[in-house]
Image: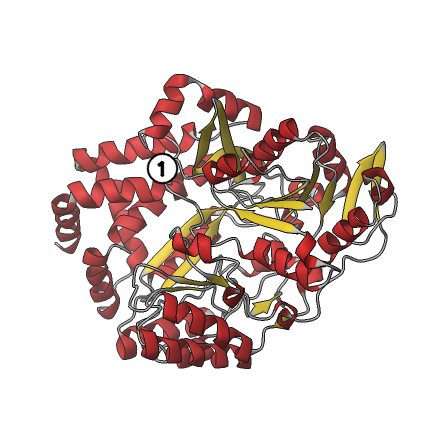
């Protein structure tokens, strides 16, 4: 049985997730560990569509599994349709976090893409195994649909799904060490970064996050001994390779005792192989544990405590808990003084219940701390999250717009494919004009408060008990005097509005035009706007930035 597992990424300009497809590797290993005669299954993983197209010249799958993430849903669906033309009897199975959890939306999705046979909710290992077992036993697709296997839904006139809860594996140890099997060797040799997971689940229930669902409340772990075996394999392979990063798929690293055992193993591998230098992890909001971890590794880490908001009523609306602002300030002050590390946080604009005054207060609290990198994101409405529920949307009168996921577009055999995300630009407490106000303020903050060269000035203002928000607001109202920067900011605001569409169809129609697609290829459209315009200002007009800073001081 030939099985193709697709986690394709657009790479027309740059690749969105430059890691091996960990989830697909775990599916493959779990299947082969739990099915009779595993040698009878030929499973291939794909990350790049060109390689898939080349393989399809001589190898046609019987089953295709496609991941659904916000950055590659449409790309994977397109390639599943392509494979169906080669093999009309191919069975298509979709899984991943970008699938809906509400019945009406599930039906809508399966009617729109009626060639998808099965969708898997939440964790995929057990449901995927069960589908493959039934196919191997000679069951037809329609028979399997009506078996109502837990964790799976399908359409046959009506939605078919079990009332039983979706199954979960009991431990990450069921996979064993994965890299030593060689499953990812080809992808690693092609330049993709290793991805590991030592903890799965999240104790929090944040409404905007996929793992905010109660399904993920129970945390499961991987034994440090298994992690060490994979790290030894990777350490030997990437000895002294500082261009290759290590990614961990954990959601709250540093929250649990086992995380420190994992951190010790990483340090052991760093000392032995001088790798990894760069580690990408989502850290827990636990300042004491992060401080302990700051000096554990050979190379400086960038500890991050993501706040999203400091507004109590907003945190209640989204089921989020934060550390106090005082603890946040003390943490960043200690990290800067004791370790000299950069620090990082993120905020989300347009959360339900947030208004202009409350978000300004959040910005003031954050900018008057010594956290260096402050990322202000527009709220994304992710499928499968509590926030995407229609009742939630109506309650807060959230206005949805559609934007191209930055740089996530491809042209495959004259077909132009775009991946799209939904963003919130207005609520019943924050107007669209206020959203635009904060977008401009976000760009100014990126340039004047987080940029390495100008960050020192912010620290000196803080040390002299000066209010950073007063400084930022001063820049906001005086930047027009500096024509070069002012023009760039006006371009940013124009593109900020122009990248918003009222529907997916409207977006696809616009970008499919030859002129628009040419601008995408040139990087003039479809980029991360804060990053794009920050770089333009800093690289070309740093002298003017310093003039503004000096003017404020006078």
Q: Please report the residue visible at 67 percent of the width from the left and 66 percent of the height from the top.
A: 217
Q: Position of residue 533 (x, y in %)?
A: 29, 40
Residue density around tag 1, few if under 14, some if 14–19, many if 20 or more, within 10 Å: some
Quadrant in the picture for residue 86: top right
The answer to whether 34 is drawn above or below residue 82 in the figure is below
Q: Position of residue 321 (x, y in %)?
A: 57, 66
Q: Is residue 525 left or right of residue 455?
A: right
* Residue at image location 62% in from the left, 39% down from the top: 397
Q: Residue at x 48, y 51 (%)?
A: 348
Q: Quadrant of the C terminus?
A: bottom left
Q: Is residue 209 visible?
A: no
Q: Which residue has dot 1 on it?
A: 13
What residue sits 58% from the left and 38% below the top?
A: 59
Q: Is residue 283 left or right of residue 542?
A: right
Left or right position of 153 against 322: right
Quarter assignment of residue 371 = bottom left
* Rendered location of residue 115, percent (x, y): 71, 31
Check the image and tell me how it is coloured. secondary structure
- Rendered position, 240 above or below 69: below
Q: Nearer the viewer, residue 236 or 507?
A: 236
372 or 99: nearer the eye?
99
What secondary structure is marked by label 1?
loop
Rendered position, 249 above or below 426: below
On the rendered structure, is 513 left or right of 122?
Answer: left
Q: Visible in this render: residue 253?
A: yes
Q: Residue furthest top?
A: 514
């Amino acid at each position: 049985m030939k099985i193709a597992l697709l986690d394709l990424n657009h790479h027309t300009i740059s690749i969105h997730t430059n890691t091996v497809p960990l989830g697909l590797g775990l599916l493959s290993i779990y299947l082969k560990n739990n099915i009779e005669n595993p040698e009878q299954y030929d499973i291939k993983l794909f990350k790049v569509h060109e390689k898939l197209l080349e393989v399809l010249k001589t190898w046609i799958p019987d089953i295709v599994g496609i991941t659904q993430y916000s950055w590659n849903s449409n790309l994977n669906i397109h390639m599943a349709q392509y494979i169906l033309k080669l093999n009309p009897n191919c069975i298509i199975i979709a899984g991943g976090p970008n699938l809906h959890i509400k019945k009406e939306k599930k039906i809508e999705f399966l009617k729109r893409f009626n060639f998808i046979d099965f969708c898997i909710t939440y964790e995929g290992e057990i449901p995927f195994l069960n589908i493959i077992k039934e196919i191997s036993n000679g069951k037809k697709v329609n028979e399997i649909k009506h078996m109502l296997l837990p964790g799976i839904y399908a359409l046959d006139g009506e939605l078919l799904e079990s009332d039983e809860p979706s199954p979960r594996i009991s431990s990450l140890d069921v996979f064993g060490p994965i890299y030593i099997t060689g499953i990812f060797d080809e992808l690693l040799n092609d330049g993709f970064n290793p991805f590991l997971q030592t903890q799965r689940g999240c104790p929090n229930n944040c409404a905007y996050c996929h793992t905010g669902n109660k399904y993920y409340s129970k945390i499961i772990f991987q034994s440090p001994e298994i992690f060490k075996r994979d790290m030894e394999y990777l350490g030997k392979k990437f000895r002294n390779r500082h261009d290759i990063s290590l990614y961990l798929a954990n959601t709250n690293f540093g929250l649990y005792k086992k995380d420190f055992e994992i951190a010790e193993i990483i340090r052991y591998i760093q000392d032995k192989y001088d790798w990894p230098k760069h580690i990408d992890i989502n850290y827990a909001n636990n300042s004491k544990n992060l401080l302990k971890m700051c000096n554990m590794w050979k190379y400086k880490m960038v500890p991050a405590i993501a706040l999203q908001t400091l507004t109590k009523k907003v945190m209640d609306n989204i089921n989020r808990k934060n550390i106090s602002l005082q603890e946040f300030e003390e943490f960043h002050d200690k990290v800067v003084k004791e370790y000299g590390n950069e620090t990082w946080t993120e905020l989300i604009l347009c959360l339900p219940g947030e208004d202009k005054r409350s978000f300004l207060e959040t910005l003031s609290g954050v900018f008057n701390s010594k956290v260096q990198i402050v990322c202000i994101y527009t709220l994304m409405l992710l499928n499968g999250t509590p926030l995407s529920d229609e009742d939630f949307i109506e309650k807060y009168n959230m206005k949805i717009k559609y934007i191209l996921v930055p740089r996530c577009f491809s042209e495959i055999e004259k077909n132009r494919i775009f991946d799209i995300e939904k963003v919130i630009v207005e609520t019943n407490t924050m107007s669209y004009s206020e959203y635009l106000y904060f977008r401009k303020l976000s760009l100014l903050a990126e340039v004047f408060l987080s940029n390495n060269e100008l960050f020192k000035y912010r620290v000196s203002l803080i040390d002299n008990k000066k209010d950073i928000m007063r400084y930022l607001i001063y820049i906001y109202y005086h930047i027009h005097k500096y024509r070069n920067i002012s023009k760039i900011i006006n371009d940013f605001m124009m593109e900020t509005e122009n990248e918003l569409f009222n529907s997916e169809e409207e977006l696809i129609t616009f970008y499919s035009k030859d002129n628009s697609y040419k601008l995408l290829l040139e990087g003039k459209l479809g980029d991360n706007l804060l990053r794009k315009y920050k770089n333009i200002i800093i690289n070309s007009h740093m002298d003017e930035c310093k003039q503004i800073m000096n003017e404020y001081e006078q």
